[in-house]
């Protein structure tokens, strides 16, 4: 992959095209493993959650809610420094994404199944982040909603990489067209 990237970069040098490689995952080294273990010990997250920037949450019909530390961090809060729950999460949804998210959530609560929805959030510092939200309802024996639980995954880096890749592909296509 590195050799191919270097060869393409040399070929397109001076043509206004930047060639990069995107490698999924991370390099497993003693330093990375040690860092993940420290994050896990301090936050209570699994190493996978810490690495993935994955928050988890639960909300009871009674209104009680629990969020993982990472869930708070994704929105820009210090863990347990805000009251967790759907109203707080919804207040961070980008206004253009709110109606679709609420409608899809209502459908899942009404019909059962699982929600998988990508939406933008605005953090406490005003940063725009892309997230992938999953939600699963749990029903009691009588079929009434008992609780919701799910995850929020920060996919901002993936979205930004996709945007850069799309722009590079367009520049490359334009270069071949001339």
Image (tube, rainbow, N blue to C red):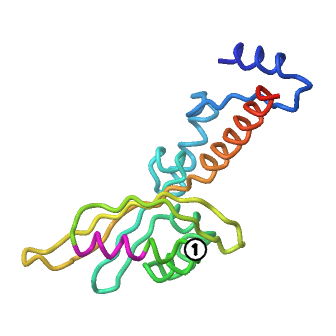
Residue 4 horizontal/vertical position (percent): 70, 15
The residue positioned 72% from the left and 20% from the top of the image is 5
- Judged from this view, the residue extending furthest toward the front is 178
The residue positioned 56% from the left and 43% from the top of the image is 36
Between 51 and 176, the residue placed more toward the observer is 176
State whether residue 43 is above or below residue 75.
above
Classified by dominant secondary structure, the portion drawn in magenta counts as helix
Badge 1 local density, few (<14 within 10 Å), some, or many (20+)?
A: few
Left or right of 102 on screen, residue 122:
right
Q: Is residue 105 magenta?
A: yes
Left or right of 76 on screen, residue 173:
right
Q: Which residues are magenta?
A: 102-110
Location of the C terminus (image quadrant): top right
Instruction: Check disc 1 and report the residue beneath it.
Output: 96
The residue positioned 67% from the left and 46% from the top of the image is 163
State whether residue 82 is above or below residue 27.
below
Residue 73 horizontal/vertical position (percent): 58, 65
- Judged from this view, the residue extending furthest toward the bottom is 62
Residue 2 horizontal/vertical position (percent): 70, 18
Label 1: which secondary element: helix
Between 51 and 86, the residue placed more toward the observer is 86
Left or right of 47 on screen, residue 137:
left
Q: Is residue 165 magenta?
A: no
State whether residue 139 is above or below residue 175.
below
Q: Quadrant of residue 94?
A: bottom right
The residue positioned 87% from the left and 32% from the top of the image is 16
Q: Quadrant of residue 115?
A: bottom left
Residue 34 horizontal/vertical position (percent): 59, 37
- Judged from this view, the residue extending furthest toward the right is 14
């Amino acid at each position: 992959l590195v050799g191919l990237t270097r060869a393409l970069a040399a070929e397109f040098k001076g043509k206004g095209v930047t060639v990069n490689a995107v490698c999924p995952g991370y390099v497993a080294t003693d330093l990375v493993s040690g860092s993940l273990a420290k994050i896990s010990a301090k936050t209570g997250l699994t190493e996978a959650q810490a690495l993935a920037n994955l928050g988890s949450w639960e909300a009871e019909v009674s209104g009680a809610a629990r969020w993982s530390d990472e869930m708070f961090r994704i929105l820009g809060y210090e863990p347990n420094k805000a009251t967790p729950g759907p109203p707080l999460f919804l207040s961070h949804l980008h206004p253009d994404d709110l109606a679709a998210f609420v409608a899809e959530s209502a459908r899942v609560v009404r019909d059962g199944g699982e929600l998988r929805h990508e939406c933008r959030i605005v953090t406490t510092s005003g940063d725009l982040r892309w997230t992938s939200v999953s939600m699963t309802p749990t029903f009691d024996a009588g079929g009434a909603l008992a609780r919701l639980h799910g995850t929020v995954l920060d996919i901002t880096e993936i979205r930004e990489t996709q945007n850069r890749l799309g722009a590079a592909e367009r520049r490359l296509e334009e270069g071949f067209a001339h």
